[in-house]
Image (cartoon, rainbow, N blue to C red):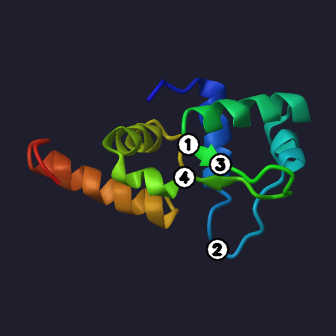
Amino acid sequence: MRKMSDLQRETLNLLLSHVGGGQVPISRREIAQQLGTSIQNAQARLEALRSKGWITWEPERARSIRLRLDRLRDASFVVEVIAILRDGWGDTTDPVAQHIGKAYETWKERGGTAV
C-alpha cells in the first residue's frame, strides 16, 4: 500500500470520526468545510484515498463514502491504521480502532511475533 500524505491522513481521520453511532455519512461539502478547503480539493483527497484502497463510494449517490472495513484482513492495511492511531491521527473511541489497538498491544506484548 502506498504511503499516505499528511493531508490524506487528516481526511481519513475526519472520516473515521464520522463512523458509526447512527450518524448520517458525511458529505463532500461537509468534508471541505471541516478541512477548511474547497470541495475540489476535498474531492482530490478522497480520490487519492480511494485509489489507495482506504475508502469507496457509489457514483452519483450522495453521502455514500464508506471506509473499506473489509480491508481489515489485509495486514498492510492494519499496520497503516495502527500507525495512524499511534501518531494521534485516528479516533481512538471508534470500536474498530479500539479492536485494532488491542490487537497491536497484544502483538507488542508477545514480542511482535503473533497476534
Amino acid at the residue labelled 2 = Gly
Determine whether the residue tagged by mark 3 lies in a helix, strand or loop. Answer: strand
The residue singled out by tag 2 in the image is 21
How far apart in space, not on screen, are marks 4 and 3 (Cα)? 7 Å
Say whether marks 4 and 1 touch (CB < 8 Å): yes
Q: Residue placed at 59% from the left, 53% from the top?
A: 67
Q: Which of the marked residues, 4 or 1, is nearer the chain's N terminus?
A: 1
Determine whether the residue tagged by mark 2 lies in a helix, strand or loop. Answer: loop
Using a 10 Å C-alpha cutoff, classify the residue at mark 2 as few (fewer than 14 neighbours), some (14 to 19) or many (20 or more).
few
Answer with left or right where residue 95 lies relative to residue 32: left
Determine whether the residue tagged by mark 4 lies in a helix, strand or loop. Answer: loop
Q: Which mark is residue 68?
A: 4
Amino acid at the residue labelled 4 = Arg
How far apart in space, not on screen, are marks 4 and 1 (Cα)? 6 Å
Q: Which of the marked residues, 2 or 3, is nearer the chain's N terminus?
A: 2
Say if 9 sits above or below 111 in the image: above
Amino acid at the residue labelled 3 = Thr
Determine whether the residue tagged by mark 1 lies in a helix, strand or loop. Answer: loop
User: Of residues 47 and 110, which is closer to you in this image?
Assistant: 47
Q: Residue placed at 44% from the left, 29% from the top?
A: 1
Say whether marks 1 and 2 touch (CB < 8 Å): no
Q: Nearer the viewer, mark 2 or mark 3?
A: 3
How far apart in space, not on screen, are marks 4 and 2 (Cα)? 17 Å
Q: Which mark is residue 113?
A: none
Using a 10 Å C-alpha cutoff, classify the residue at mark 4 as few (fewer than 14 neighbours), some (14 to 19) or many (20 or more).
some
Answer with left or right where residue 105 lies relative to residue 80: left
The residue singled out by tag 3 in the image is 56
